[in-house]
Amino acid sequence: MKHTTISTVAICLLASSTVLADAPVDLKKYEYGGDQASLLAVERQAEDSMVDKAKQSRMAAKLLDVMTDKEATLAAKQHAGIMLRICGTEAEVPALANMLGGGKLGEFARQAIERIPAKAAGKALRDSLGKLKGPALVAVINSTANRHDRQAVGALIGLTGSGDASVAAAAAHALGRIGGTEAAACLKRLAANGKNAELAQAYLSCGIIAMDFGDKTAAAGIFDTLADAKYPASVRRGALPGQLLLADDPGVLLGKWLDGDDPEAYRVAADNISKQANDWLLACCKGKPVDKAILFAEILASRGEKAALPILTEAAKAKDNQVLRVRGIAAMAKVGNRDSVSLLIDALDEEAPILRAAVKVLSTMPSNLIDKAGLEVYKKSDGRQRATLGDVLVARRMTAAVGLLLELAKIENDADLRADVSFALVTLGDEKTLPKLVDIILAVKDRKHCDKMETTYLEIAKKHENTVEPILAAMKDDAGTARLLSVLGRVGGKTALKKIEEAVASENQQLKAAGIRAICNWPDASVADQLAKLAKEDKDKGVRISALRAYIRVVSLKSDRPTEKSLDMLQKAFEVAERPEEMILVTDRVSTVRDMKTLRWLVALLDNEVVAQEACRSIVDLAHHRYLRNPNRDEFAKALKKVIEISKDTSTVERAKGYLEGV
């Protein structure tokens, strides 16, 4: 139904008592989708009538009048029926009962009768059980269940034998919802062969209702019956907990189920043993093989009970049973000892499920058990074990490992060790770590190793405002300064730039070369002017090339600079380029400048044999951005067609075709 306007609702809600009195009359004309003013007025009046029985009776009579008026619309009758669910009285029941079975109107009446809290309403529904058929009868059966009408049980029992399967099923379901001795007896008989899950479920409901009413004897009989293995598993999973709840000694029953070969009983027992005391759990462990005892040991371990550890250890060593090993290892977190740590560390060389369980436990065990042992093993380990132990160190935030990591960081020509140590140091290191990293950078000779240590310094420094003080403090002579300028350039900042500019201007060629390398490593475009000057004016061609490539890189980084300015800077770099490599680099990086002027420049470059193929790729990269492509469909269409025509790269052509379809 469409919403009425705010003004209409306001008028309705503020209407005078005279207007409200006429609301049911106005309702008679309501059509689906029409103005809802009359609906809202009737709802307001129905709710207001509930404070006074006389007003309620008058309102209910008016609503019944709507339902019996031949001139009233079906929509009006439906709404009147809905309101009778709120304010209907015994007086309306006879008329409503006469409507039962009468199509949609009968359904409106049934729903109203179901909600009327009068004995006559229940009787009307019961009487109709013997008169109606098909869906209408099923609906009334459901209403008796909704009212939990035990006086309807006799009739419902009779209907369970109906030739209409839907009626018989509805009657059985209703009996399960109503409960009681008669209903339970009928359902027990119907469900006796154990093949019909719905009948058995209805019988189970009788047991639950009996429990709610405090009739433990009746409930126990039902649960005992349905616990039999012939009944569906879904039903037994409801009956078995009922048995357990009523048992004089739940522990005895749990023990029986756990030792038996009934999978459903075992499952229910396993779900409930956590409620038992430690003594009971310990007693259950005795004399059982580890695969049976593990269940109890896991619960004990979760409570910190050390007596569970021998069982967990045996399980963790069960070489032929991966699942059991994982369970044993995973439960050790709260009860493990130093011997457990050795076992867990050995497990780091095992298959993935076992390894993951060991890492999780090692990451949470007390420091007094794991820290010293873990570091000793880390120092000697290699390969996957060392990498995994690194994960443990990081997960534990084991800052005590930093000293060892720095010692290992001095070892050159071992790429795996270098990667493992750097990973751990980046997480665990702090400002105090930085000076020691600087010492390592000064000492190592392998270029790759030095680069990795510089990167490690950079990542730690980012967490501490990109501090350069440790680097500056270590620049005690020209050789040390030259060695450290590279990392200084990667960190960046005004202080670093001043030092690097001094080096670039130095007469010392080693310092100057290191300063140029440092400024070429700069992390942002703040040195663009210096790089541009070097690219144009330096006498050394190698310097010009390095500076130009660095200039192209920093200019194309994300910045607040206007796109037109960035494009202009890259175009000038293109003009300065002495080699095809740098021209191609500009053509590639210019796609980061998302502007239509960039597209037009790239289209012009399609006639340049040196960069045409790279220009094709960059045009396609620009077309990827819908906010740029969609408002400029015609220009992009022309550019993409030309790309398809001249590109030699299959992937570029396919992407261009896809974006061309998009425009």
Image: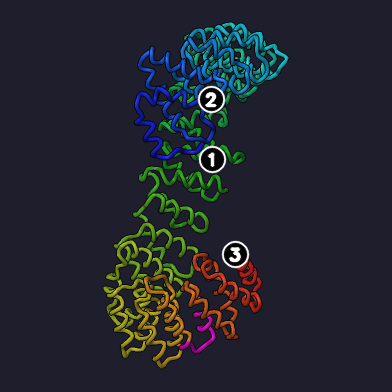
- Is residue 169 depicted above or below 591 in this figure? above
Horizontal relation, residue 465 to residue 86: left or right: left
**Residue 366, image quadrant:** top left
- For the stretch drawn in magenta, what is the main secondary structure? helix
How far separated are the C-alphas under marks 1 and 3?
A: 52 Å
Range of magenta residues: 575-587
Whole-percent x, y for residue 543 in the image: 42, 87
Identity of the residue drawn at 59% across and 85% down: 607
Which of these two is toward me, 67 or 515? 67
How far separated are the C-alphas under marks 2 and 3?
A: 50 Å
Q: Find disc 3 in the rendering and name its residue.
A: 662
Does residue 493 belong to the magenta stretch?
no
Q: Check disc 2 and give the amino acid type.
A: Gln
Does residue 581 belong to the magenta stretch?
yes
Which of these two is toward me, 68 or 558? 68
Whole-percent x, y for residue 595 in the image: 47, 73
- Is residue 640 depicted above or below 537 in this figure? above
Query: Reading the chain from its start, which is encountered first: label 2 or label 3?
Result: 2
Query: Reading the chain from its start, which is encountered first: label 2 or label 1?
Result: 2
